[in-house]
Amino acid sequence: MPKSLSLADRTAILMAKLAAASIRKLNLGLGSNLPGRIARKISPTVLKNLSAQSTRGVIAVTGTNGKSTTSGILSSILRSAGFTFAHNRQGANLVTGITASMVETAAWNGDVRADLCLFEIDEAALPVVAREVHINGVVVTNLFRDQLDRFGELDTTARLITTGVDINKSQAILNADDPNVAQMKLDGKHLFFGIESTEGEAAAGSQSELAYCGNCSEEVRYSRLFYGQLGHWHCPKCNHARPKPDVYATNVVVGATSSRFNLTVAGKEVDCVLPLPGLFNVYNALAAAAAAHWLSVSIPAIRAGLKDYSTLFGRSERIKINGKEVIVQLIKNPAGASQAVASCVKDPKARVMIAINDNLADGRDISWLWDADFELLGGGGVHIIVSGQRAQDMAVRMKYAGVDAALITTEPHLQAALNAGLDSLQPGETLWLMPTYTCLLELQKIFKTMGHAMSGT
Ligand SMILES: [Zn+2]
């Protein structure tokens, strides 16, 4: 039994494990926070003492977007490199969820056999966790202004992260291309990642976010812009500029389901394949590669980890919300959407909700909706809720697919649409939820507020 654990710690682990087992057995769907809450009540030092057992310390992933994907890719790389590690993969990224994941990782006697703890941490929770746990390294993916941002001000979020990193003078692994991240003034060492060059369409970014110089407050300009406020930035007034990244991608080619790029780490270049679409996922891969490099993972292991990354995100996932059955299937192209619809119509007890956004990550052009086989839903008498920013367009698409107008409910607001969908379910029925990428990201946040975390993003 680990000597570092007090009697209170051991009691806490035992009680929390029993609670977790009961929750699973009774199918209560209370999410993954309650065992953590119980453990912390019994022993406030339980997280500290459990994580202290890892031989190579703790690495945290934070930032407004991409935390789950970045930590997912990093765990794939760590597996390739033969590391054992604890990871709060349920996406419960507040201190109670992180405690719950450590309790789950530990044996009944409190033994944690892990080289490393990998924590995905909410920006606001970072200082809370950092005061308890010695965090060796912190990856900051990006800092986007988010319409759902609970903290309102980007400055507040930046301050929370800076405070969290400085508590342990953690090694910072930062996005060089995001002026909001690259300009953070931190006490510890820095390592930067970024995109050097892209090929074709991916290069044609448009600036949707303003960013400012940390020295003189002037608005930064870009010699290359990838998306949002991410790119090769510089201050026109004081010449403060994007730092040269230590880990970077060149010749990035983004495809419909995967991306290719040349990865340079420590001056060595290798060609990489990432089985995820979107430039934002290339940033997530670079963040993970930079963290892995800092952990002394070899370049072949990084390359293998990127290639082998597989995610539940995008595969269909069955979840239970408030005791009701929901199947979630990401749709992002005609082939995938047609498959999702084909599976759904096989279920005689299906109710359907389709949520379409047209943000950059979804693809601005939604004309692909006309190439997907929504006709399968026509004439079946199935009630369909359409939601998201392009709910109206989807309603029109449904009418053309032959769905009776009286069976279509248009509710652009996702939470309201989800509530309506859940409320409409009769016993034995399942809600088939088909969101685009950013709708799914929003829905995951909504699921969390309802006490349910999806298994992986
Ligand atoms: Zn300046």
Image (tube, helix red, strand yellow):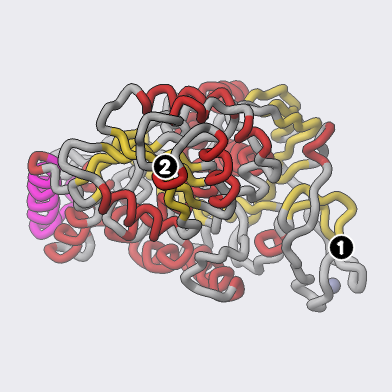
Earlier-in-chain disc, 2 versus 1: 2
Residue 74, visible in the rendered structure: yes
Instruction: Kindly identify which numbered label has been placed on residue 56.
Output: 2
Residue at left offset 60%, top offset 47%: 393
Q: Is residue 39 magenta?
A: no
Q: Quadrant of the N terminus?
A: top left
Alpha carbons under labels 2 and 1: distance apart: 40 Å
Residue at the extreme bottom: 216
Tell me the chief SS of the magenta region: helix
Residue at left offset 27%, top offset 55%: 451
Q: Could you say which is closer to the camera, residue 47 or residue 408? A: 408
Residue 187 position (above or below residue 258)? below
Residue at left offset 89%, top offset 53%: 223
Residue 285 position (above or below residue 45)? above
Residues drawn in magenta: 1-24
**Quarter of image, ligand 1:** bottom right
Residue 49, visible in the rendered structure: no
Instruction: Kindly identify which numbered label has been placed on residue 221.
Output: 1
Q: Amino acid at mark 1?
A: Arg
Residue at left offset 20%, top offset 52%: 30
Q: Position of residue 208 (x, y in %)?
A: 74, 60
Q: Could you say which is closer to the camera, residue 191 or residue 257? A: 257
Q: Amino acid at mark 2?
A: Arg
